[in-house]
């Protein structure tokens, strides 16, 4: 029975990482669309959006220059593959909330 539970757990982890990748891809597409309309966005949101891009590009550079063997260390992998992308995704969710609130209020 333990083998079956481990098998299910591994598949849940794989699906989680797959959907996390899809979430990241969709958020990058939405961020590109926001940048395309940056002249319409108020300055406070521009700062958040530019910071998001700075962090996202920084993360991609950081992740791409790491030693391949280091990525197999469990704690390092958890941090770089799950925690950091989820923090970045949470920040982008906050940005979209601010955009929605700004659009609803009809500010500036």
Image (cartoon, grey):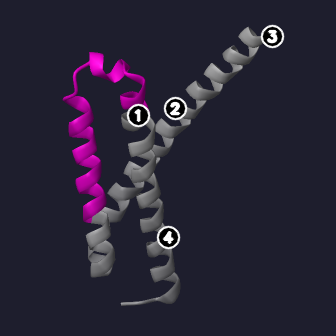
**Residues at marks 4 and 3, CA–CA distance in whole angstroms:** 44 Å
Residue position for label 2: 17
81 in relation to 99, above or below = above
Residue 25, given in percent of the width and then of the height, sits at 42, 43
User: Residue drawn 80% across and 10% down?
Assistant: 1
Question: For the stretch drawn in magenta, what is the main secondary structure?
Answer: helix
- Numbered tag placed on residue 1 in the rendering: 3
**Label 4–label 3 contact, CB within 8 A:** no
User: Residue drawn 25% across and 63% down?
Assistant: 50
Residue position for label 1: 81
User: Residue drawn 27% across and 53% down?
Assistant: 55
Span of residues in magenta: 50-78
Q: Residue furthest right?
A: 1
The part of the image, by quadrant, that contains residue 38 is bottom left
Residue position for label 4: 97
76 in relation to 46, above or below = above
Q: Residue furthest front?
A: 75
* Of the image marks 2 and 1, the number of the one nearer the N terminus: 2
* Of the image marks 4 and 2, the number of the one nearer the N terminus: 2
């Amino acid at each position: 029975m333990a083998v079956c539970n481990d098998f299910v757990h591994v598949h849940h982890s794989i699906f989680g990482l797959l959907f996390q990748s899809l979430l990241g891809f969709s958020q990058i597409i939405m961020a590109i669309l926001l940048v395309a309309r940056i002249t319409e966005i108020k300055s406070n949101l521009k700062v958040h959006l530019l910071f998001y891009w700075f962090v996202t590009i920084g993360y991609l550079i950081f992740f791409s220059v790491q030693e391949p063997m280091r990525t197999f260390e469990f704690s390092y992998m958890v941090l770089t593959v799950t925690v950091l992308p989820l923090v970045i995704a949470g920040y982008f969710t906050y940005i979209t909330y601010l955009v929605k609130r700004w659009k609803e209020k009809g500010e500036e």
